Amino acid sequence: MSARDALALPAVPPPATRAHPRRDRALVTVFFALLVACALFDPLHGRKVTVENRVPAAWPGWPSSTDWFGRFDAAFSDRFKGRSALIGLQHAVLVLGLHTSPGGNVVLGRDDWLYFAGEDGHSLDRHYRGTLPFPQALVDGLVAELERRRAWLAARGIAYVVTVAPDKSTIYPEHLPAWMTRMPSATPFDRAVAALAAHPQLRFVDLRPALRAAKAQEQVYYRTDSHWNYLGATVAYGELMREVQRAVGTARLPAIAPAERPPYVAGVDTYRGDLARILGVPARYDEADIAPFAKVLGDATRRCAHRIDAGQYDGFEFYACPRASLRLVMYRDSMAIPLIPLLSENFARAVYVSSRRLDPALIEREKPDVVIEELVERSLNAPAALPMPAP
């Protein structure tokens, strides 16, 4: 038996059979046929299964730069007819098969709860886990800017009430995934509340105690959405309006309009929130809508306040209630959407502004009795980042 030569080259493989090239051509043909079919035909017939929240990339025009092919690829990909179906398939495999979020800004919690990780995907790291810093300078800047706004408004006899809408993780941390633990030190929200306590003239409403007390009775945030539900909004409304009443006095605001609860029909009133839609599998995350906000909006005959603009001013909404006397300007984000029909019942004129920058010109023009500023917890640094312009 001859010894094997360790340096010998391996035997040359036998030549491919005649069927081999035919098989390769068939596979290539099928691949390109599928590619063309997905490019030209939409199996969902226009139905979207995911929200990318952006406009499609523009066609690049005539080739004029080295990045033309990349821009063409982006535009072509956005117009791929089967794009939505393929993304939906990918999302379904990740969420249903692997229990993994396909998007960096949605966290899959326990008990089918979903959490928003912020626009940059790091809100929970910054405001809950403490794995990203929130410098004290940001807290100090927030307090300084809010105090600056308060002083300017007070000089004009305008009451100023500020509130922070807690992130869902602050009120419902028990449904976060087991690996996500809370920072041992004070959160940025805790630090901001402590700093604001040193400014008693600044009327700040901490909604956390009331929301935590209410959640012991009923659910106050959507399970599948980044926002509170209508019940959570009514809790915030009550806390806000009681502070407004203390600010202006009972002579000017003798009563607070009640928040009526819309009827719930089991099995009919269901909800699929924004986080479920981002995941691309909304049917997987149905939940009971125990106080349907759509019914509040749908029954305008029971309310005094009505919208008086036609939506022609981007970022602004105007409401009027003839039986009231006070005037309101509210700076707000999406958490205030269910607050709008509630608050408007208490004001002869209410202006809602989707901005974090207080505009002195708007205040001088509207001459409100009250300015309310609402911001969600994850945007605590926004007022300091967008300071009020010099009057």
Image: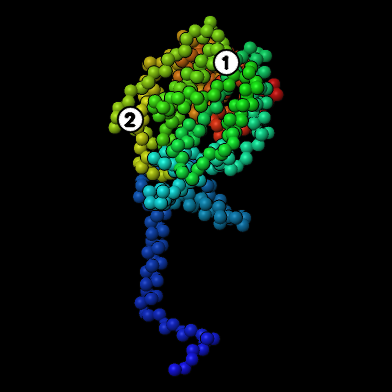
Q: How far apart are marks 2 and 1 (CA)?
A: 36 Å
Mark 2 secondary-structure assignment? loop
Direction top: furthest residue: 251
Give the quadrant of residue 366.
top right
The residue depicted at 45 percent of the width and 13 percent of the height is: 257
Q: Mark 2 points at which residue?
A: 269
For the point 54% across and 16% down, which residue is it? 243
Could you say which disc has been placed on residue 370 in the image?
1
Q: Residue at x 60, y 42 (%)?
A: 132
Percent position of residue 296, x then y: 39, 22
Residue at image location 36% in from the left, 22% down from the top: 262
In-front residue for pair 247/300: 247
Identify the amino acid type marked 2. Answer: Asp
Q: Give coordinates of residue 3: x percent, y percent.
A: 48, 91
Q: Is mark 1 on a helix, strand or loop?
A: strand
Is residue 51 visible in this depiction of the protein? Answer: no
Q: In which quarter of the image is the N terminus?
A: bottom left
Q: Which amino acid does label 1 sit on?
A: Val
Question: Quadrant location of residue 385?
Answer: top right
